[in-house]
Amino acid sequence: MDKKTPENNEKVAPPPAKQTKTESSTSGSSVPKGSVGGAILVNTKQRGNPLLKYIKSVPWEYAEVVPDYVMGADVCALFLSIRYHQLNPDYIHERLKLLGNAYRLRVLLVHVDTADPNHALKHLTRICLLADLTLMLAWSNEDAAKIIETYKIFEFKPPEMIMERSDMNPQQKLINALTSVRSVNKTDAMTLLRTFGTVADILKATPEALALCPGIGIQKAKRLHKVLHEPFLRVSTTSPQKLDQ
């Protein structure tokens, strides 16, 4: 009866909790996710890919992942060159089988390294539509690295950061429309608007009247007048009789 009990003496501290390691998991996939705000995860099979030396703006590291690149918790990319696709047309299908439905945003990054890629790109576009992939084209290893970096940099940016701004004032929209004509710069567009006041009056003006504006000149005026008065739809000049011959 001389044993001490917790009720009559000091409180007994609970034993420390055991430290256990937890592994990140993905729904429906065993593919490890990219660490939040961490480095780009690169598939070990990408060793030797020359684009890696151009990834300088964000850190990257090799990891056991199914995609070639993981740029965020739900963003990944498969890398493919046109030349390799032409030699191994079944390669991309095998990669997609391994990837399954993992990752919300899946990018097919294609390096255009052949002179005539049209047929291959048509085929890859169809694959992207069927497999829910975003097709991105790069004409150099540096371009490809920039695309991967951009996805990582904008991982936590709001969509408005990369969406076209819709709050442009009406005058700026008119200036943008006029500068879409070759050789017409922003200064020319502002001069035209100040001189004539409205686009309707610019449309009514003759090439000679347009050429009176400072910095326009007769050649630029003729080009602008021609563009402004071209029909929206081009009418075929081939007659039915010629087609029958």
Image (cartoon, rainbow, N blue to C red):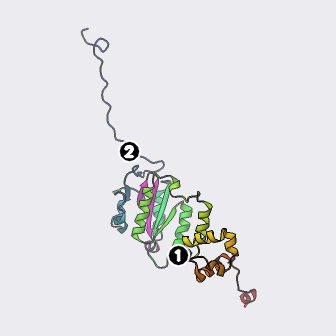
Name the kind of residue labelled 1 in the image. Asn
Q: Give above or below for 244 relative to 190.
A: below
The answer to if 125 sits in the magenta stretch is no
Q: In 3D space, how far apart are the residues under numbered discs 1 and 2 (Cα atoms)? A: 44 Å
Q: Which residues are magenta?
A: 68-90
Q: Which image quarter: residue 200? A: bottom right
On screen, residue 215 above or below 21 = below
Report x, y in % for residue 87: 44, 74
Residue 232 seen in the figure: no
- Find residue 72 and name its label: none
- Determine which residue is flagged by label 2: 23
Work out which residue is located at the far top of the displayed protein and give it: 1
Q: Which residue is mark 1?
A: 118
Across and down, in percent, residue 83 comes to: 44, 74
Residue in the picture at 45% in, 48% down: 26
Please say whether residue 87 is one of the residues in the magenta stretch: yes
Asked if residue 16 is positioned above or below residue 136 in the image, the reply reads above
Q: Nearer the viewer, residue 137 or 170?
A: 170
* Quarter the N terminus occupies: top left
Tell me the element at label 2: loop
The residue closer to the viewer here, 195 or 186, is 195
The answer, for residue 48, to whether it is visible in the render is yes
> Within 10 Å of the Cα at label 1, are there few (<14), some (14-19), or many (20+) other Cα atoms?
few
Return the disc, 1 or 2, that comes first in the chain's sequence.
Answer: 2
Q: Residues within 10 Å of mark 2 (few under 14, many from 20)?
A: few
**Disc 1, SS:** helix
- The residue type indicated by label 2 comes to Glu
Q: Closer to the camera, 189 or 87?
A: 189
Measuring 44% from the left and 51% from the top, which residue is drawn there?
73
Picture coordinates of residue 109, whole percent (x, y) = 46, 65
Report the quarter where the C terminus lies: bottom right
Residue at the image position 37 percent from the left and 42 percent from the top? 22
